[in-house]
Amino acid sequence: MANAEHSGQMGGAFGAGAAEQAQARLKVARIGLWTIAAVLALRQVTVALSTPRGDRLTDLETWVGPNGVLHVSGSLYDSTRFTGTPFAGLVLKPLTRAAQQALGWSWTFGTLLLVVALGLVAARALPQPVTRRSALLAAPVAISLLMLSLPVRNTLYLGQTSIIPVLLVLLGCFAVRGERAGGLLIGLGAALQPTVLLFAPLLWFTGRRRAAVSAAGTFAVCTVLAWAAMPHDSYTYWVHHLAGTGLGGKADDHANQSLHGALLRLGLSGPLEIGLFFLLGAAVAVLGLRRAIRYAHDGQLLLAVAVTGCVAVVVSPTSWQHQLLWVLLAVVGRVGRRASDRYMWPVAVVLVMTLPATMMLPNIGGIEPLRDNLVLLAALAAATCVPFLSRTSPYYRAPVPTEYARPVPARWKHVPLLPYFRRVLSRPNLLLELLLIRVTYAAYAQVRLAATGDSSTAGRATAEHHGDQVLAAERFLHIDVEHWANHAVVKVGWLRDFFDFYYESFHFVVPMTVLAVLCLRRPVDYRWARSVLGFTTLIALVGFWLYPLAPPRLMPHLGIIDTVHGVQDFSKPDYGTLTAVTNQYAAMPSLHFGWSLWCGLTIAILAPRWWMKALGLLHPLFTVSAIVATGNHWVLDAVGGAAVVGSGFGLVYLLQGPRARVAVAAAGVSTAPAPVKARTPS
């Protein structure tokens, strides 16, 4: 959009019509984005207010409720439940007289307004050159990302004040006029959250020395004022607890995403841990502030603010989940020379800040330290090593463009979304692909587990009723071979072992191998095949949700022997530990067969040798034999799997036309991307 605006005015009637069409599309996009932001905001507020009173706004209740710490006559920190500064306690004291219910509603909607203001200021502060139109589109996107982020969701749920320091810093840097006024706001933020004082060196070394002095002075005045009003509490906070250290939850809790918390989780303690924390923290502070100062001089002040905030997250003794908004602001940094690589960093940051760590990394013992400190690692990377592009780089505004195949007439051009599903010819970003595959599979597993066919009594009855329906249909079609195949295989030991091994091992290994080979050797076909697999899985999830189905092994009256999982104890509602991992009633359609059929067809279409094609087609044959012989699926489940695979191929053809290699070959052009020289910014 920005390139179109800088390309000059369009002449003639055609140009005027195109300009009006672009304006209309921009208006529709803006309305759509604001609608999404409004829906997300409404959802978050509804979730917060519909939660039972004893379970929501628990931190606010701890502070200002009838039995809250701000009501007691002793110290605020006697119970360590209050984690704010003495100045924060002084500010919150008047709220203790407010009605509890009215305070909860006003606090929730007040927090919502703060989030909206934060998104508007962040959109306005994007690095130049940014047009007014771009800023108008950026504002609803920023608000939507904030609403989805875990820090904002925790703030709304707990009733925290962590958004206020972030907003005060952004207002002080971008909204108010005059350095002293900006420093005043930043100093107030530091009085509420002491690590915000790290912005004073950023201001000083970027030429805003009056703002730096004003920030430090405001912080000192507020702290002295609180000390005069509450000397005992101030001594407890600043001296006994070393600026709040030890308040709140345990420092080694996973919610504490600071360097101190990570070292404690790694088993370090005592003087060694404290010394290492101060040494590493000082190194991160020096390196991070140097990078922030460099980006500020480069005209990327919002990125400089984000980097400084990430430094504050790392070096703070405690950085609880609701205090981590600084990491989300780092999405404004541009990383990568190729246009296809530009999405890697922002997508990774957004996923880290919106999804639980268990969805980002699998539950494997060797990578638990990475999973437990994922947000800390993102903050540490933003502060110290992510190679954000300078605005002077020729790739900042003109990255190496992505190579696309020519449009083909097979697509339905009257469908509005189709122009965005273009066939890409260049090699994908491997890290981004792995990240999206992992997150997509985690979402698939969660939806599959949460489908209506659960292990409750009602879910079991529904699933078994559907099982009787499927069995009746198979008997009508004379294909009810499950009992015969299962008992015939059980009698042959080596055959039973082969099918058990095939069922357990090849379901994931073969699809991942096919994707890996295509990504390395045939990137154009990889994107096509990956899209087919994605649509196939998505359609299957709908089937799991709408038609929970018990597999033959979970139909007690059929006498099917579960050769893979062993004898099921039907007296237990969960039938053993496997139900806690996956939904046992997600049998229709069979993705065991669906994924194997996708593998077979992909290999048959793309393999260069006939024997490779034949070998690929053997995989779905062995898979359908395994799922039926082991009692894990009905024959009609495989039919359903074939149907969703066919739907996946059909949807990709509908959205993109023929696969790119066929389309390019028909057009008589090469699939190899031509070398593109980077254009210097105009």
Image (cartoon, grey):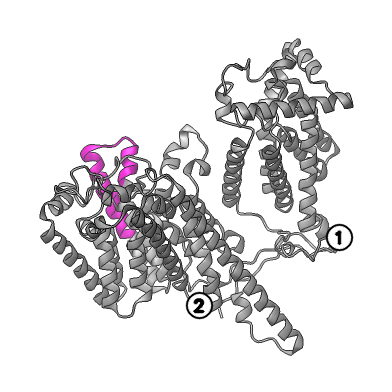
Q: Which residues are magenta?
A: 260-287
For the C terminus, the image quarter is bottom right
Percent across and percent down for residue 605 are: 82, 44
Which of these two is toward me, 228 or 443? 228
Structural crowding at the residue carrying mark 1, measured as other residues with C-alpha within 10 Å and reported as few (<14), some (14–19) or many (≥20): few
For the N terminus, the image quarter is bottom right
Percent across and percent down for residue 455 are: 59, 28
Q: Is residue 22 above or below residue 621?
A: below
Q: Amino acid at mark 1?
A: Ala
Our reading of the magenta stretch's main secondary structure is helix
Tell whether position 263 is magenta: yes
The answer to whether residue 7 is left or right of residue 409 is left
Percent across and percent down for residue 19 are: 68, 82
Residue 531 is tagged as: none
Residue 129 is tagged as: 2
Percent across and percent down for residue 630 are: 72, 21
Q: Residue at x 68, y 29 (%)?
A: 462
Q: Quadrant of residue 329?
A: bottom left
Under circle 2, the secondary element is loop
Under circle 1, the secondary element is helix
Tell me the distance, in whole angstroms, between the alpha carbons under discs 1 and 2. 41 Å
Closer to the eye: label 1 or 2: 2
Residue annotated with mark 1 = 666
Q: Amino acid at mark 2?
A: Pro
Which of these two is toward me, 321 or 519? 321
Q: Quadrant of residue 592?
A: top right
